[in-house]
Image (cartoon, rainbow, N blue to C red):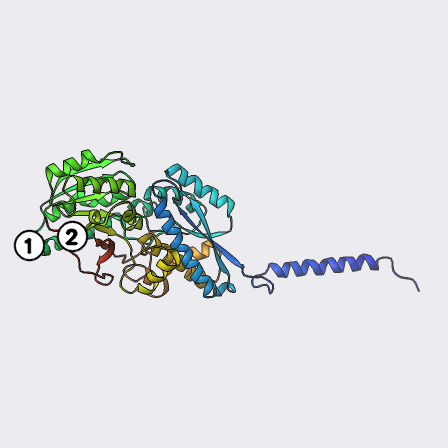
Amino acid sequence: MKVCPRIPQLARRGIAGAALATLAASLLPGAVWAQAPKEVKLAVVVPLSGPWARNGELHVKGAQMAVDDINAAGGIKALGGARIKLITADAGDSVEKAKNAAQRLLASEPDLVGATGSFVSSFTLAITEVTERAELPFLTLSYSDQINERGFKYVFQTSPTANTQAGAALPILMNLATQATGKAPQTVGIVMDNTASPVSFSKAMREGGFEKARVKLMMDEVFTPPLSDATSSVQKLRNIRPDFAFLLSTNVPDTKLLLEKMSEMRIGNGAIPVVTNGGHMGAPELLKVMNKETLEGVMVVIANWGGKGHEALTSAFSKRMNEPWMTQDSISTYGDMWIFKQAMEAAGSADRRKVAEAIRKMDTNEGAAKYYPGGHLRFDEKGRRVGAETVILQWRNGVPVPVYPPSLAVMAPLWPKR
């Protein structure tokens, strides 16, 4: 019997056709062997060198603790228990370095799902120019109003903006002063650096806030950080002696210079009540470089802090991260990691565009919402968190404690008496 010489050729064609059919089936949605990723990458882009390095370290510690907790609880269940891997990038000490860090990060980690950072608003503005082009969802507690005024779709601001904080804080501070002294303050001074956050924070007060509160701005001093000498600024404060003063510096060395010079010139410790702004003002590092008497009574307008209802979390953070307390930087990035987890669970995907869409659709008081003042997670069309509350801390016996709002406060506020 003869074998047709075309049979081997036909068999080969049949095998090839079957292979192509199998490959085509694998490309269809829901293919049986499509697997969820075993790990998903999230990044923290913050200064890890230069004058803001300490705040960057605290950002990373909060995020790492959340990643550890999420992974220990089973990872991303909708992705088959995928674990989160945390990537860190150093934004450095300048806008240019921050932008370059973001570019390098995206080049080296093309499968990144989301990111958080970057403490200094000027850096955040630069970094998010890069992440927006990559359609990478970026969460930030940076305060500048400019961050979400650019029509971006992938930037989410969990904090109340600087203008919102300033608008809310001034009436609160006026009430505290009136309750403590029996009369409202009539004069105020400002000493601030020229980075984006203080500029935004003071803008609303300058443009009608002080006038509405019937407070006269007696001194308006602006400097470029780092501050080399605080003598001139503090001397002006001593000469004018306003009823209270805003010291709006964005790093620990400058704050130290200003407060210690005030103490040296005998206008510290409540002689002129001091109001500050920003996460660095609650950093443990302050107590390492200044004595608690210099800080006593200093008030801090801030976007987030661990307080009432966070006792178990803050205690665990202190033990595991060897820190005396949990700062704004740490609790915010802790919450950010949980936001990304909830978004991936809702999306059932680690695709960055789908994750961003899930964040846009969030409207909840559960889960990650409890790590932000106001206890609600919903973002408006600009990417700002709706209902974000302003927090006021006060240094009391060497510890910064929340004194406002009442839902978070662990001590009653005191207005330092002159």
361 relative position to 255: left or right: right
Q: Which mark is residue 227?
A: none
Q: Is residue 119 visible?
A: yes
247 relative position to 354: left or right: left
Q: Which mark is residue 182?
A: 1
Among numbered discs 2 and 1, the one appearing first in the sequence: 2
Residue 149 at x, y = what percent?
31, 46
Q: Is residue 71 above or below residue 255?
A: below
Q: Is residue 323 above or below residue 50?
A: below
Query: Quick one: which residue is furthest to the right in this view?
Result: 1
Residues at marks 2 and 1, CA–CA distance in whole angstroms: 13 Å
Can you tell which quarter of the image residue 272 is in?
top left
Quadrant where the N terminus sits is bottom right
Callout 2 crowding tier (Cα within 10 Å): few <14, some 14–19, many ≥20:
many
Residue 44 at x, y = what percent?
42, 50
Q: Secondary structure at mark 2?
A: helix
Q: Residue at x 25, y 45 (%)?
A: 290
Q: Amino acid at mark 2?
A: Leu
Query: Quick one: which residue is furthest to the left in this view?
Result: 182
119 relative position to 349: left or right: left
Q: Residue at x 17, y 57 (%)?
A: 413
Can you tell which quarter of the image residue 37 is in?
bottom right
The residue at which mark 2 appears reads as 173
Can you tell which quarter of the image residue 206 is in?
top left
188 relative position to 97: left or right: left
Q: Amino acid at mark 1?
A: Gly
Callout 1 crowding tier (Cα within 10 Å): few <14, some 14–19, many ≥20:
few
Q: Is residue 168 above or below residue 75?
A: above
